[in-house]
Image (tube, rainbow, N blue to C red):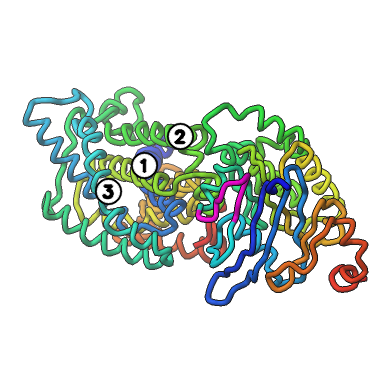
Amino acid sequence: MAEPYLSAADMRGGYGKADILNGCTLTVERGQIAVIVGPNGAGKSTAMKAVFGMLNLREGSVRLAGEDITQLTPQERVRKGMGFVPQTHNIFPTMTVEENLEMGAFIRDDDFRDTMEQVYTLFPAVAEKRKQNAGELSGGQRQQVAVGRALMTRPSLLMLDEPTAGVSPIVMDELFDRIIEVARTGISILMVEQNARQALEIADIGYVLVQGANRYTDTGQALLADPEVRRTFLGG
Amino acid sequence: MDILNALVAILNFVVIPAAAYGAQLALGALGVTLIYGILRFSNFAHGDTMAFGTALVILVTWGLQALGISLGPLPTALLALPIGIALTSVLVLGVDRAVYRFYRRKRSAPIILVMASVGVMFIMNGLTRLVIGVDEIRFDDGARFLISVQQFRAWTGLSEGLSLRVSQALTLVVTALACWALFRFLNRSRAGKAMRAYSDNEDLALLSGIDPERVVRLTWLIAAALAVTAGTLYGLDKSFKVFNYFQILLPIFAASIVGGLGNPLGAVAGGFIVAFSEVAVTYPWRKIAAYLGFETDGLLQLLSTEYKFAVSFVILIVVLLFRPTGLFRGKSV
């Protein structure tokens, strides 16, 4: 079997002395949506930050498209094709929507206007507000700007840290629809989600993390159907 | 005609001096606010950077004068200004490398950087005294007045006179040009947008591939250029004295905080607000009251000019109490 597009294997490490990740493994195929769920403090966001290089790994490796990128900084990983949307502080609030997207494309020397048009096509609501400061938009629209900013480098793997945190259920459904559209263009998605049930519904593969290690790994539908997972993590 | 005389007096004694002073404060406050936005500390050495740069401009001016080079009606200092800016930039970049970079790498708290800048302030102050001395220096040459009191009286036939000095007009023109260039740079250019992005969200700027050290260098260069320009205009308008440049730090800080720290537009507005308040509060209004028909024995001066710095203090306190983020919503202190 060919190597998966992203393969983060046996990751161990943390911020201080104690490890938060205890042998966590995440893989994503091209164009797949992978969702990480789990209880509070399970190390979901930490696992994603480790994949992005914001955390020093004591053990384990991260490989992207067959290349070992374990030692690269986050900035270098962006150039390798990773896009990251942090959970908070993920926009430039006093800059316009358009400027936010421009800054997303900062490392690109070529003409990025067509990418910008693609982002606007994907998010028509923010396209209307392109001259408005991003900080003045609603929560859902800010998330769209944040995702759009990360898409400007034309990443092959887009990582989203709780994209639906603090937005209304309607906006959440809308965001998930957009994420599916992004995945259809061939971009792999790795996403941490609090709204586990809804996120697993769109997931090609779901990871249930507990105490920094994989507890269950299966397709989203299979996890939703698993009575054990339902009882312990999805509230019945 | 009395109302006209009153208007001319207000223009001559309040509006023109306050506008020139406000423009000088605005240029200074722009530098402080940019440093705050990018490097995230209040630079106490800004006043003495102005003094040092102006001292260099004066030395170059003397050199040019000795060579017989002049700008005709305009002060020779204008020709020396670019050289002063270049030399000051070298010094400021050197200071950043020797002092601030160390604390930046350690991700020190802003207060530590502020204290470091106090140290830099003392050293720069000493350096300036060493280079040019502590005496008052006048270095404005060329024509003195654009409009003199006699000319104005002859033109209008009013008893009240009005004068507009070359240095005042020059201050306003240069400030307008500098602001126009700066705002254009910040809003249009890639490097300027990168600076704003870094000021908005440091981590996200880093993720977007913006090089923080380049942004920091650019910020120091712009701040140095603004500081030397402000210092030279202030020196041309009044006179050069090292100690005055140390003192002007307070109204400059007041201006940038009133406008909202980190907000360039606010810094400009803040400069004029502080200058107009200072001049309006310390000006004796008796003459103007008399023109309007109110004869009094008092001077109608709210505050003696020796206490003009109290105005900055009061503005600072009021803003910090009621609107800590400033009029234009900068970062809170």
Q: Amino acid at mark 1?
A: Ile
**Residue located beneath label 2 in the image:** B185
Q: Residues within 10 Å of mark 2 (few under 14, many from 20)?
A: some
Q: Which residue is mark 3?
A: B50
Q: Is residue A70 left or right of residue B65?
A: right
Secondary structure type for disc 2: helix
**Residue sitting at x 79%, y 38%:** A184
Q: Which residues are magenta?
A: A62-71
Magenta stretch holds residue B62: no
Q: Answer whether labels 3 and 1 touch (C-beta < 8 Å).
A: no
User: In the image, is residue A185 above or below residue B322?
Assistant: above
Q: Is residue B285 visible?
A: no
Which residue occupies 68% across, 51% down? A159
Q: Residues within 10 Å of mark 3 (few under 14, many from 20)?
A: many
Left or right relative to B165: residue B66: left
Foreground of the two, A204 or B255: A204
Compared with A179, B187 (above or below) is: above
* Quadrant of the rendered image containing residue B16: top left
Please say whether residue A181 is visible from this viewpoint.
Answer: yes
Residue B171: x percent and y percent? 33, 36
Residue under numbered circle 1: B222
Q: Amino acid at mark 3?
A: Met
User: Element type at marker 3?
Assistant: helix
Counting residues from the N terminus, which is met first, the one under dot 3 or under dot 1?
Answer: 3
Task: Answer left or right for A80 relative to A183.
Answer: left
**Residues under numbered marks 2 and 1 in contact, where contact means CB atoms less than 8 Å apart:** yes
Please tell me which residue lies in front, B151 or B274: B274
Q: Are marks 2 and 3 on the same chain?
A: yes
Amino acid, disc 2: Phe
At 73% from the left and 54% from the top, the residue drawn is A191
**Secondary structure state at the residue bearing disc 1:** helix
Residue B332 has which mark? none
